[in-house]
């Protein structure tokens, strides 16, 4: 099962590499194609990217009809995607009032990061096998991440970062741990919104990339203690940088 999940991660990373090189119809604002993919999931990604790119502001009202016209699709998959975002606490649905972008604070992000740190620490303790296949997927992820940073594409980088940490949690072999971690990651995707300056946000991505590199080096050594230390150091550093914002 782990090998199969890693193969899916490989396919996902290849997709993002292709999208980065072709200006990404999927991730580019206002340029969304729904061919050959699950419509609801693709709408979900597009709407999350509106938050990441600051197109949507906290507490802004969401109009399903306008989105239906923008994407040239029916309202059904849009509503389905928004209900999923409500479950991620990214959207507030108020009866008889409408749908709104959720507001969040720095403390909200820090609280979620604390839980995520505990989950990833648990995952590193449960890693039983470190295959060469896993290490290669991590190296590929680093390359794709650097391309996204170079392009200044925060949305693509967010998905690549999610894939990197998913490789860590899935290596634990605990499917429920991975599922809970993925749900929490939806909140961490809006971490960038804490940075008012785009240059500062890009610098955060570069620093995270260096820390990811140290994690991969620890996996290459197959040193579980060093892996745990590198992952904890990375997330603790992320926390310190958020506090300084």
Image: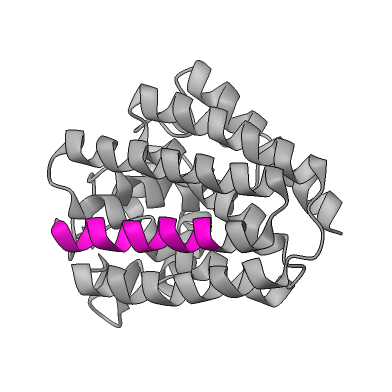
Q: Which residues are magenta?
A: 229-244
Q: Residue furthest top?
A: 22
Q: Residue furthest bottom?
A: 95
- In screen coordinates, is 61 left or right of 231? left
Q: Which is more toward the observer, 125 or 119?
A: 125
Residue 60 colored in magenta in the image:
no
- Indicate the position of residue 136 as horizontal and vertical percent values: 72, 36
Q: Which is more toward the observer, 98 or 24?
A: 24
| For residue 48, above or below residue 59 | above
The image quadrant that residue 168 belongs to is bottom right
The image quadrant that residue 182 belongs to is bottom right
The image quadrant that residue 206 belongs to is top left
Which coloring applies here? one colour
Which SS does the magenta portion mostly show? helix
- In screen coordinates, is 46 left or right of 225? left
Q: Give me the residue at 73% from left, 51% from top.
A: 222
- Indicate the position of residue 5 as horizontal and vertical percent values: 78, 53
Q: Give me the residue at 24% from left, 41% from top.
A: 201
Q: Which is more toward the observer, 200 or 23?
A: 200
The quarter of the image holding the C terminus is: bottom left
Residue 240 colored in magenta in the image:
yes
| For residue 36, above or below residue 192 | above
- Indicate the position of residue 240 as horizontal and vertical percent values: 25, 61
| For residue 60, above or below residue 174 | above
């Amino acid at each position: 099962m782990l090998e199969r999940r890693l193969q899916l991660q490989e396919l996902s990373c290849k997709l993002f590499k292709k999208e980065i090189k072709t200006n990404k119809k999927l991730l580019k604002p206002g340029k969304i194609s729904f061919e050959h993919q699950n419509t609801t999931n693709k709408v979900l990604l597009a709407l999350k990217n509106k938050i990441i790119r600051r197109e949507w502001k906290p507490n802004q009202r969401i109009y399903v009809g306008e989105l239906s016209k923008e994407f040239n699709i029916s309202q059904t998959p849009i509503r389905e995607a928004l209900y999923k975002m409500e479950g991620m606490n990214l959207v507030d649905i108020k009866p008889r009032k409408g749908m709104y972008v959720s507001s969040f604070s720095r403390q909200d992000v820090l609280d979620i990061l604390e839980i995520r740190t505990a989950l990833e620490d648990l995952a590193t303790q449960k890693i039983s096998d470190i295959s060469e296949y896993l290490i290669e997927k991590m190296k590929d992820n680093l390359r794709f991440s650097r391309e996204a940073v170079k392009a200044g594409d925060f949305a693509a980088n967010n998905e690549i970062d999610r894939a990197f940490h998913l490789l860590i949690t899935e290596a634990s072999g605990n499917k429920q741990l991975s599922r809970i971690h993925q749900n929490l990651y939806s909140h961490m995707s809006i971490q960038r919104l804490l940075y008012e300056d785009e240059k500062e946000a890009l610098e955060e991505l570069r620093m995270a990339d260096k820390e990811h590199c140290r994690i991969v080096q620890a996996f290459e050594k197959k040193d579980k203690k060093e892996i745990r230390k590198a992952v904890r150091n990375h997330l603790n550093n992320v926390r310190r940088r958020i506090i300084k914002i």
